[in-house]
Image (spheres, helix red, strand yellow):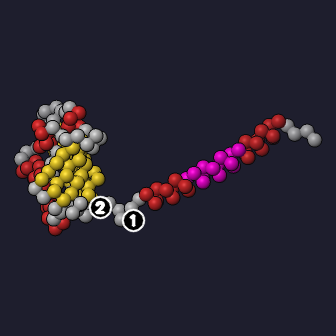
Amino acid sequence: MFVPIRNVFRRVTSARSAKRSSLLVALMIATAASCKSAVSAEPTVEITSLAEARSLWTALQPVHYRMTQTISCFCGTEVTRPVIVEVNGQAVTRRYADNGTALPSQFSAEFRTVDELHAFVAEAVARPVASITARYSGTTGVPIFLAFDGSAQVADDELQITVTDFRILR
C-alpha cells in the first residue's frame, strides 16, 4: 500500500507532539507541586504604616535577633554587599554575609537595627525628602523594604534597604 510521505510525516509529527505535550503537562504538574510545597502555608503579609510596624515590634520585644540587610545605592562594594546584623541585648554585631568577616566600623551606621530602621523612616517623614517608601512585615513590624530619595534635585542620593532572613534567636 502506498502512503504519501506527507501523511507519514503528519502521523510522526502528531505522535511527537502528543509525546511532547504529555511531557510538558507532567513537567508543569511537577513544577506546580514543588512550588506549592516550597511556599509556606501562611502568606507573607506586608504593611506600610510605621506606627503599626512599631506597635508590632514593641509587642514582640525580642532580646536576640538576626537579619540580613542589603543596601542598593551609588556606593562602594563595602556597603552594597549583604550584611548580617545581629542584636543580642545591647550588643550589635555586623558581618558580611558572604564570608563572615566583620564590617569595617566606618560603615556600621549604614546597617541599622530594627529600632534604628524605624527611626530612619520617622526622621525621613519628619523632614522634607523627595520620597520614602517603606514596607514592613505584618507579623513582626520589621522593615523589609525601604526606598529613600533625599532630594529630587540631587543625583545618586537614592538608597534602598532590603531586609531578609529575619530570625528571633531568643
Label at residue 69? none
Q: Quadrant of residue 61?
A: bottom left
Label at residue 45? 2
The residue carrying pointer 2 sits among few (fewer than 14), some (14 to 19) or many (20 or more) residues within 10 Å by Cα, namely: few
The residue under the point 76% across, 42% down is 12
Taking depth in this image into account, of 85 and 32 the one nearest to the observer is: 85
Q: Quadrant of residue 47?
A: bottom left
Q: Amino acid at mark 2?
A: Val
Q: Under tag 2, what secondary structure?
A: loop
Horizontal and vertical percent position of residue 158: 18, 38
Give the position of the C terminus as an image quadrant: bottom left
Judging by the rendered image, the residue that carries numbered circle 1 is 41
Q: Is residue 28 above or below residue 156?
A: below
Numbered disc total: 2
The reply to whether the magenta stretch includes residue 135 is no
Q: Under tag 1, what secondary structure?
A: loop
Horizontal and vertical percent position of residue 17: 68, 45
Residues in magenta?
16-28
5 vs 145, left or right, is right
